[in-house]
């Protein structure tokens, strides 16, 4: 295939780059020359408001929010304890279920 090739991922035509220099160029020019996007099937799995699928200003706002949470966690260790407690409670709620639909849980 080479370092750059066309393929189909998740049912959508896709250009795949395994070239470091090209990937660097694309990332440095995102929102100028390129727009990052994911196939519609990924939107369905992750949800329309996932930081991985939104673009533009909405992506910038979500990214800023996520970074703020990371910095808050570094400055306040009890914040991580709250996150861990919440994660444990969510996983415990799955205990009596025969099946957990991960895509539905991820959207929550």
Image (spheres, helix red, strand yellow):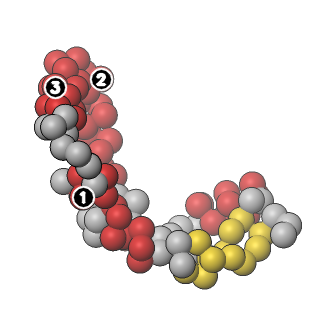
Q: Which mark is residue 85?
A: 3
Q: Residue furthest front?
A: 98
Label 2: how many Cα within 10 Å (few below 14, some 14–19, many 20+): few
Instruction: Report whether 98 appears left or right of 63.
Output: left
Q: Which mark is residue 74?
A: 2
Q: Which residue corresponds to the image point at 31% horizontal and 58% vertical from the top-left?
A: 103
Q: Position of residue 74 (x, y in %)?
A: 29, 23
**Mark closer to the chain start, 1 or 3:** 3
Residue position for label 1: 104
> In the displayed image of the protein, which residue is found farthest to the top?
77
The crowd level at tag 3 (other Cα within 10 Å; few <14, some 14-19, many 20+) is few
Q: Residue at x 72, y 78 (%)?
A: 6
Q: Identify whether 5 is placed above or below 99.
A: below
Marked residue nearer the N-terminal end (1 or 2): 2
Q: Quick one: 34 or 50, which is closer to the camera?
A: 50
Residue in view at x 20 percent, y 28 percent: 88
Secondary element at image label 2:
helix
Other residues around mark 1 within 10 Å, as few (<14) / some (14–19) / many (≥20):
few
* Screen quadrant of the N terminus: bottom right
Question: Mark 1 and 3 residues: CB-CB less than 8 Å, in contact?
Answer: no
Residue 56 horizontal side relative to residue 76, left or right:
right
Is disc 1 placed on a helix, strand or loop? helix
Marks 1, 3: nearer the viewer = 1
Distance of mark 1 from mark 3, alpha carbons? 21 Å
The reply to whether residue 83 is visible in this rendering is no
Q: CA distance from mark 1 to mark 2?
A: 30 Å
Q: Nearer the viewer, residue 39 or 24?
A: 39
- Nearer-N-terminus badge (2/3): 2
């Amino acid at each position: 295939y080479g370092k750059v090739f066309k393929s189909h991922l998740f049912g959508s035509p896709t250009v795949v780059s395994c070239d470091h220099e090209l990937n660097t160029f694309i990332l440095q020019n995102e929102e100028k020359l390129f727009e990052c996007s994911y196939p519609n099937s990924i939107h369905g799995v992750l949800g329309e408001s996932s930081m991985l699928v939104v673009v533009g200003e909405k992506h910038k706002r979500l990214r800023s929010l996520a970074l703020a949470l990371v910095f808050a966690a570094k400055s306040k260790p009890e914040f991580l304890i709250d996150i861990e407690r919440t994660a444990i409670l969510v996983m415990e709620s799955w205990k009596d279920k025969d099946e957990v639909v991960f895509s539905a849980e991820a959207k929550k």
